[in-house]
Amino acid sequence: MNLPSPLSLSMFSTLDDVPGAEIAPLVERATTEADSEILTGLTDLLLDRALRLLREGSRQEILDEALAVSQGISGEAGRALRERSLETYGAWAALSDLLGEAARRSDRAAVPSLLRSTQGHGLAILELLAGEGRALPRAEIRRRLSLGEAHLSHLLRDLAEADLIVRYRLQGSREVLVDLGRVGKEEVARAVLPPWLERLVESLATISAGSPLDAEALAQDLHEAGAPSRLAADRLAEAVARLAPAAPDLGSSRSEPDNVLKFTQKLANQKEDGAFHFQEMLDLQGGQRARSLFETEDEPALAASS
């Protein structure tokens, strides 16, 4: 774009929908040459363009506009603008941040559609990387997911463009490594391994260690960790709590489930031996309950032997 010298307000009427790359030289030149009236008019133009792009612009158009505005607030141009008009500098900085965030949000909004369009292979790569917790060689991804070379190349390119993955080589190596990108890490935390699921896994580990569980506290933790809803957190906590060991009832003759399992295993190991160590098993299982569990009408001699 040919810029007149000096800059004038009349030229702004033709710049409503030109590409961001054509606006960039105007923004940079205005930081050192334009008077306050021109700066105000240019700020109004940039705001109108931003509003239009936020309504109907593509992610790339928004990125181009953000780059154009940032040229006016960075480096020597930015220092000059700040000295000449701190108000204009602040407005352009805020506009640059707004456009940059809009581009990032547009990027994230396109992620589900991108992952669906890869027939599940894109999500499978994210899950593989998340599960390993490290970068993986490209060849290993291809082998473990049984993907064709051409398909993998297109897939990794699309995922890299969306910042779902990053590809790089270590110095002196020809092997391409693949790792989660910024957006990929966000997607893993949102949908693949969300924090509330990790909290649920921790609770199950607590139960397996024989510790009691507070269902109400777990429900609150799951909710705060981002469970799909409060109702989902409550239901999950209730289900997990039912798996927790109950407090022992010292006044009851009923046996603990793990003792029943031990007794059954001991009996199975000795099923070929007619001489059972029955008294030892009675002590383990709690006396008469073991007899009632395992006596049958076909084996009266077993009961008599005690």
Image: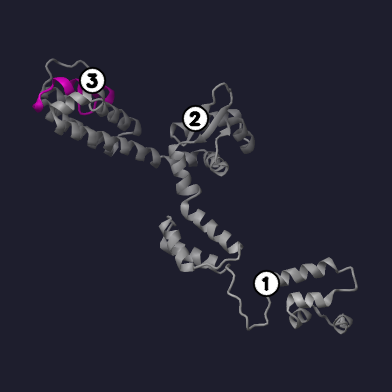
> Which residue is denoted by mark 2 in the rendering?
157
Residue 257, disc: 1
Provide residue 177's location: percent of width, then percent of height. 55, 30
| Residue 149: quarter of image | top right
Please tell me whether residue 262 is drawn above or below residue 7 in the rendered image: below
Please tell me whether residue 36 is drawn above or below residue 221 in the rendered image: above
Q: Is mark 2 on a helix, strand or loop?
A: helix
| Residue neighbourhood size for the residue with mark 2, other residues' Cα within 10 Å, grouped as few (<14), some (14–19), many (≥20) | some
Q: Is mark 1 on a helix, strand or loop?
A: helix
Residue 306, disc: none
Front position among marks 3 and 1? 1
Q: Could one spot residue 78 in this view of the protein?
A: yes
Q: Could one spot residue 112 in this view of the protein?
A: no
Residue 25, disc: 3
Give the magenta part as a residue range. 15-37
Q: Is mark 3 on a helix, strand or loop?
A: helix
Q: In which quarter of the image is the C terminus?
A: bottom right
